[in-house]
Image (spheres, grey):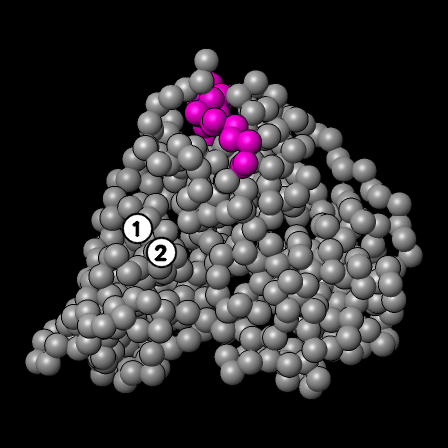
Amino acid sequence: MPNMSLNKVPMPEQDPNVRNKNFKEVTLGYTEEMAIEEAKRCLSCKHKPCMQGCPVMVKIPEFIALVAEGKFKEAYEKIAETSSLPAICGRVCPQETQCEKYCVRGIKGEPVAIGRLERFVADWYMKNTEEKPEKPEGNGKKVAVVGAGPSGLTCAGDLAKMGYKVTVFEAFHTPGGVLVYGIPEFRLPKDIVAKEVDKLRDLGVEIMTDMVIGKVLSVDELLNEEGFDAVFIGTGAGLPSFMRIEGESLNGVYSANEFLTRINLMKAYKFPDYDTPVYVGKNVVVVGGGNVAMDAARSAKRMGAENVYIVYRRSEEEMPARAEEIHHAKQEDIEFKLLNNPVKINGDDEGWVKSVTCIKMELGEPDASGRRRPVPVEGSEFDIDADVVVIAIGQTPNPLIKNTTPDLETNSRGCIVAKESTGATSKKAVYAGGDVVTGAATVILAMGAGKTAAASIDEYLKNA
């Protein structure tokens, strides 16, 4: 019998007043019974509207039908036909604006919990099977992938399945990109990322860490001296943006990138077992309204800050963060200072942050983004006590590859110019995708770009 409930099966999660003091995963996942019950809400629409919202074209109704029958292994295999990282996508994809947005059940109730079901299937498979993928027969051609983030890992996995010898060059000491340095443990456990990476190694993908392309080797050297037939660049957008206001050079001011990297990848939350401390003090101000701001604020709370404020110049309606992340942040006692904008960071006599001066804002006419432009309210300045300020207002690509590859076209923001339909750049045999092309976006969009580029690289090398 189909489940005609208007509501999703609730996802168990830690109590907010417990989880805001630990880095364990917030949501606990479905049981087998919950997954089957939720899967039965799917109407198995013949025209599959949900798939149009999936950048990697997961066969959503088909895998959900298998879950409804209790065929979890088969459901995983169905997802894996098009997605290399299902355990990750099930946790961090913004399903509400993608696959679930188009679900017919969402017209008169909540859509089917596609993301929760994908996560359940991937977790079940990791726990209950030890099968390793079969290495495909090699085709004699080599591809270099620069960056072991979601776009690079996806591209590498797809190419390996096609028979290419793939080597991934990663600047950090751990593969995963934003999955390990940017997204906190309580949203995406690092052992999940490691297991997904291990599956790629099982396919024959070689991953070389501590390899900063542009310094150790250039793109030209990969092609001309190292013998690679093509290169995919998926280095993300890791260069932080700042507000350029007085006081940003004070002690206690972090970019969100540094703050989250120290906590997540360098395991500051396990100090002193890991020797990377992070100072948060009593009061933390996080500037920004996206998922990165939510991650920074929620991490600061867990690191021991008593008061954590999110300062955002627009209203909640304009916030780019996922609704789920905003909801969880509020539950965890993060205080939202909306329609406010920092204008100065104030320091003490020793050069440390002591407060942030903000000005109240009101919304005017829409700007180029379609959101109403925030306008300062004269004479409305006020101070917020702060020991630490985290700037989370966006990031752009590191210019290293651009500066060492003169014939690689980039735009005014420093992003590599690549064709959306293929990932091809201005340089022969070089492809790019993910945040290094689009600027900071979502994990699943980066994966989709990696998938597109892999297919294009295959087509190019077959005809080379």
Q: Residue 232's image quarter?
A: bottom right
* Mark carried by residue 242: none
Which mark identifies residue 321? 2
Position of 352 relative to 440 (above/below): below
Q: For the stretch drawn in magenta, what is the main secondary structure? A: loop
**Would you call the spot at circle 2 few (<14 residues within 10 Å), some (14-19), or many (20 or more)?**
some
Question: From the viewer's perspective, is 192 left or right of 28?
Answer: right
Q: Is residue 391 left or right of residue 139?
A: left
Give whichever of 71, 327 is nearer the camera: 71
| Residue shown at 34% from the left, 45% from the top | 324
Which x, y percent locates residue 452?
A: 67, 57
Q: Can you name the residue that lies furthest to the left here?
A: 379
Whether residue 30 appears in magenta in the rendering, the answer is yes
**Residue at the (19%, 69%) spot, across then down:** 363
Query: In the visual, does 158 lie left or right of 51?
Result: right
Magenta residues, start to end = 28-48
Label 1 sits on residue: 326
Say which residue appears at 35% left-offset and 23% top-offset. 5
Residue found at x 38% / y 27%: 9
- Residue 40 in sight here: yes
Q: How many marks?
A: 2
Q: Are marks 1 and 2 in contact (CB under 8 Å)?
A: yes
